Amino acid sequence: MFELDNLTPPVIDNTHANRIKILQREGLLTKEISGIIYVIRIKRHEAIHEELHYQAKISQTILMRMEVALCGLEEKSIVTTIT
């Protein structure tokens, strides 16, 4: 929209939220469209953070399984060395 309406995007703080505010101020977005864009922006933000949380859980699980596997290998090598 910035290009179509010959607007310069903000140089500082060029975020979705700030661009939406500029478009509102210029009268290029209705309140209804602004509300829809706001909900989409918030849901996108939430989804990203949920994904990061999910990835962190997966990483923890993988590390724990690796530790258990390594402990198992160490125990086998100890038993093999002793016998």
Image: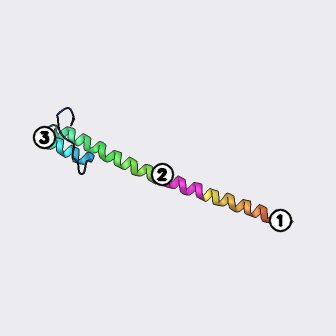
Determine whether the residue tagged by mark 3 lies in a helix, strand or loop.
loop
Identify whether 76 is placed above or below 8: below
Q: How many neighbours does mark 2 have within 10 angstroms: few (below 14), some (14-19), or many (20 or more)?
A: few
Is tag 1's residue or tag 3's residue first in the polypeptide sequence? 3
Q: Please give the label number shown on residue 26.
A: 3
Disc 1 and disc 2: Cα gap in Å?
41 Å
Q: Is residue 57 left or right of residue 23?
A: right
- The image position of residue 21, as x and y in percent, is 19, 46
Q: Is residue 60 inside the magenta stretch? A: yes
Q: Position of residue 11 (x, y in %)?
A: 23, 48
Marks 3 and 2, Cα distance to the nearest angstrom? 39 Å
Q: Amino acid at mark 1?
A: Thr
Residues 39 and 71: in front is: 71
Q: Quick one: quadrant of the N terminus?
A: top left
From which residue to which does the magenta span run?
53-63
Cβ–Cβ below 8 Å for labels 1 and 3? no
Identify which residue is drawn at 20% across, 32% down.
4
Q: Could you tell me if the residues under marks 3 and 2 are in contact, i.e. CB atoms within 8 Å?
A: no
Was residue 23 drawn as part of the magenta stretch in this picture?
no
Residue type at mark 3? Answer: Glu
Considering the whole magenta stretch, tell me its main secondary structure: helix
Which residue, as the protein is rendered here, is positioned at the far bottom?
A: 82
Which residue matches tag 2? 54
The image quarter containing residue 3 is: top left
| Residue wearing tag 1 | 81
Q: Nearer the viewer, mark 1 or mark 2?
A: 1
Task: Tell me where residue 9 sits by quadrant.
Answer: top left
